[in-house]
Image (cartoon, helix red, strand yellow):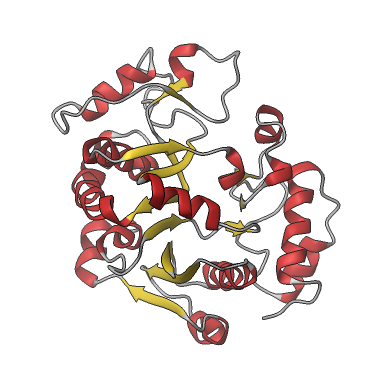
Amino acid sequence: MKHVAFLVAASPNAAFFSQVAVLRRAFDRLPWTRWRYTLHVYLGGTPEAGALEAWTPHLRGVDLRWSTAEDEQRDGDWAQSDDVFRHAPAAADVLVALDADTLPVRSLEPILDDVVADDVVAGTLAHYPTIIDNRDGAAQEPSIRDAWLRLTSGLVTTPLDFTFSHSLMDAESPAALREAPFYLNFGVVFLPRQHFDRIAREYLRLRPLLERRMSDGDFSGQAALTLAIAGSGAGTRALPLRYNFPNDPAAVRLHPGELEQVVVHHYLRTWAYDRHRIFRSAGDYHAFLSQPLEGVDQCFQADVRRTVGDTYPF
């Protein structure tokens, strides 16, 4: 039986622990016939008082790893995120970098089979061109190609392939801003073991360098992964949005039919509810279930109810 390791960076507080507990529950409910899974969580930062003790009974079987003081001093909040690449388990056929605010609701085995059989890194494209420099209040580059050229100058030599498109930009957006390299949304990224170590080393070299060059360093991880994948020689596969579907009406409009086949929800938007509060307590959970939601949020709510249950389980 093949092994997939899910790698999640988190802060040691009740919000993240509750999301991880739901992830474990969701994975347990998926059909596993050809694969077994393990869930690895990388923690860093100041712990919330009493949170770990309260949530430990609901995290059985989850591997928790804490960032070192040295890594935290050097990398700050990036320490636990970079630990995903520093300390991934060696014995796994596929490693999946996963955001805590995701919810798998359909079998992942078909895509895991494909990642191994075709030896590809797979994921959904980033929503928008977040590498554009906006420090002076307006985009400084006239095109995505110019933005990447500025960002990568002197750091890498491998040319990027601009045959992809940002996933939430419509046809009315300028073509020079729609196009993209293999620039993935970090919510769900599938990495085959054969290429992982090489990608991880390059990611860890580039990520802090890119953070200093970007107007929004929060996206330095996505950018570093793009360059690390390009330099690794790994094959790539852009996945349909169903594998990382955001709770965003634009996703429904621009990708018809994908919501009906969603495999993984990514509840990153906070317009209708606070992603950090949904699973923290019985009161928060039942308040979320009772909300009159529509569209993608209603679909997510129904899948939460189906996965977690009508009664708060923690």
Quarter assignment of residue 28: bottom right
Quarter of the image for residue 131 reads top left
The residue under the point 85% across, 61% down is: 290
Judge from the rendering whether residue 41 lies leftward or rightward of residue 297; answer left or right. Answer: left
Q: Count the marks: how many?
A: 0
Query: What is the x, y in percent for residue 206?
Result: 21, 43
Q: Residue at x 54, y 30 (%)?
A: 167
Please name whichever residue, 309 or 208, is drawn nearer the observer in this view of the structure: 309
**Residue 135 location, x and y as percent?**
37, 27
Q: Residue furthest left?
A: 154
Q: Quadrant of residue 69?
A: bottom left
Is 259 left, or right, of 240 in this rendering? right
Asked if residue 99 is positioned above or below residue 159 in the image, the reply reads: below
Name the residue rendered at 48%, 20% in the picture.
178
Q: Position of residue 123 (x, y in %)?
A: 46, 43
Q: Nearer the viewer, residue 216 or 120?
A: 120
Q: Is residue 15 above or below residue 157?
A: below
Nearer the observer, 97 or 108: 108
Residue 169 on image: x %, y %: 56, 24
Residue 25 vertical position relative to residue 151 in the rendered view, above or below: below
Image quadrant containing the N terminus? bottom left
Is 131 placed above or below 197 here? Answer: above
Residue depicted at 40% across the width and 34% down the height: 183
State which quarter of the image contains the C terminus. Answer: bottom right
